[in-house]
Image (spheres, rainbow, N blue to C red):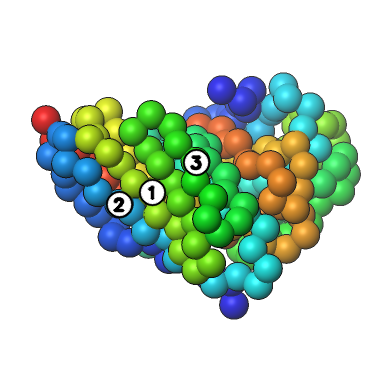
Amino acid sequence: EDQVTQSPEALRLQEGESSSLNCSYTVSGLRGLFWYRQDPGKGPEFLFTLYSAGEEKEKERLKATLTKKESFLHITAPKPEDSATYLCAVPRGSQGNLIFGKGTKLSVKP
Amino acid sequence: DAGITQSPRHKVTETGTPVTLRCHQTENHRYMYWYRQDPGHGLRLIHYSYGVKDTDKGEVSDGYSVSRSKTEDFLLTLESATSSQTSVYFCAISESLQGASPLHFGNGTRLTVT
């Protein structure tokens, strides 16, 4: 069964303290992995798509990487405005819908 | 931001009443989706549409129906609301399938069934 697991469930960092979030997946024939950011009361906001092992994408303080079994979202020198829940997802089936992990809630304290 | 509007943003209804949630997009995307988000479960697909009048079930479709009579509008109906349908509902759109393009989400409808 296709599955996406994220860890940790919650992460508290001090401003400037770099860390990584993990997304492990078990799908047959990966057709991409998506990272989203979700703020309270809002819908998920698309961040990155990764398609093949070894691929990396960067946006400001965030860098996403992909291996054959997992993806990491590295956060370098985070700021309080990076506080959010980060979701990863992979496509399932032929109609483009996604399986989501349960997310990592990141809190960055000043 | 993708042009997706969900209405209403909040709704409280009683058990047994029908409820319709609306998703309107201005992007002219072919694919539209309804997800629900619950603590401990994450986002789960309810129904999706791959064109006008073309819809299919997702993993948690029992008790829900959908309709899409125009490209821009996708309606989700709870035929007879139950307390287990208390949730936050998100509409999403995408330009293509097969994972080639990401889903873009609206800001959700918080539904409470009393």
Q: Amino acid at mark 3?
A: Lys
Q: Give the left or right position of residue A30, taking residue B37 as reference.
A: right
Residue farthest bottom in this picture: A1
Q: Amino acid at mark 1?
A: Leu
Q: Is residue B82 visible?
A: no
Residue at the spot of label 3: A57
Name the image quarter holding the C terminus of chain A: top left
- Above or below, B41 against B70 in this view is below
Q: Amino acid at mark 2?
A: Ser
Query: Is there one chain holding both mark 1 and mark 3?
Result: yes
Chain that bears disc 2: A
Q: Is residue A93 visible?
A: yes
Residue at the spot of label 1: A73
The Cα–Cα distance between marks 1 and 3, rounded to whole angstroms, is 10 Å
Q: Which residue is drawn at the image coordinates 22% and 30% (left, top)?
A: A79
Tag 3 near tag 2, CB within 8 Å? no
Task: Name the spot of residue B5 as percent of width and height, x first.
Answer: 61, 26
Secondary-structure class at tag 1:
strand
